[in-house]
Image: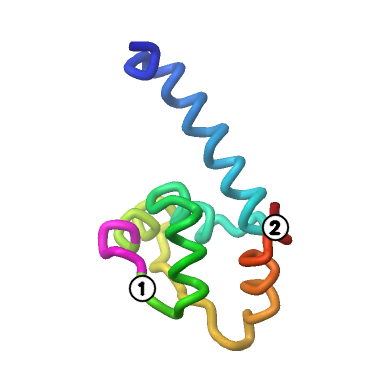
Amino acid sequence: ARLMDPVTNIDLGAQYFAQMLRQFNNDPMLAAAAYNAGPGALRKVLASGGRLPKETEDYVRKITGKPFVYPTSSAANVQKAILAGGGM
């Protein structure tokens, strides 16, 4: 019932987003994707080179104002650190 309270809901959502930022090296795009799809799902996509669900790509675009950019080989070190928990 407390989750239906707007103040409580916003506070918990902000705390969770802050946690996602810490886990994903303060990258707002990755944090938004993790917030929507879940951090485990995002790590799985990053590790496999797969794609996020369209719903998550759309969410990231709405939240950040930019389309989700999949990491390229030039971002491999950051991606490895995130997957290894270096961003936690």
68 over 21 or under it: above or below:
below
Q: Which residue is mark 1?
A: 51
Q: Amino acid at mark 2?
A: Gly
Q: Residue, x 41% and y 59% (percent of image)?
A: 65
Circle 1/circle 2 CB separation < 8 Å:
no
Would you say 22 lies left or right of 69 here? right
Which of the two labelled residues, at mark 1 and mark 2, occupies the earlier sequence position?
Answer: 1
Residue 78 is inside the magenta segment: no
Q: In the rendering, which numbered label is found on residue 68?
A: none
84 over 71 or under it: above or below:
above
Per the picture, the main secondary structure of the magenta-coloured stretch is helix
Figure quadrant of residue 25: bottom right
Q: Which residues are magenta?
A: 52-56
Per the image, label 1 sits on a secondary structure element best described as: loop
Tell me the quadrant of the picture where the N terminus can be found: top left
**Label 1 to label 2: alpha-carbon separation:** 21 Å
Q: Residue, x 32% and y 17% (percent of image)?
A: 4
- Colouring of the image: rainbow
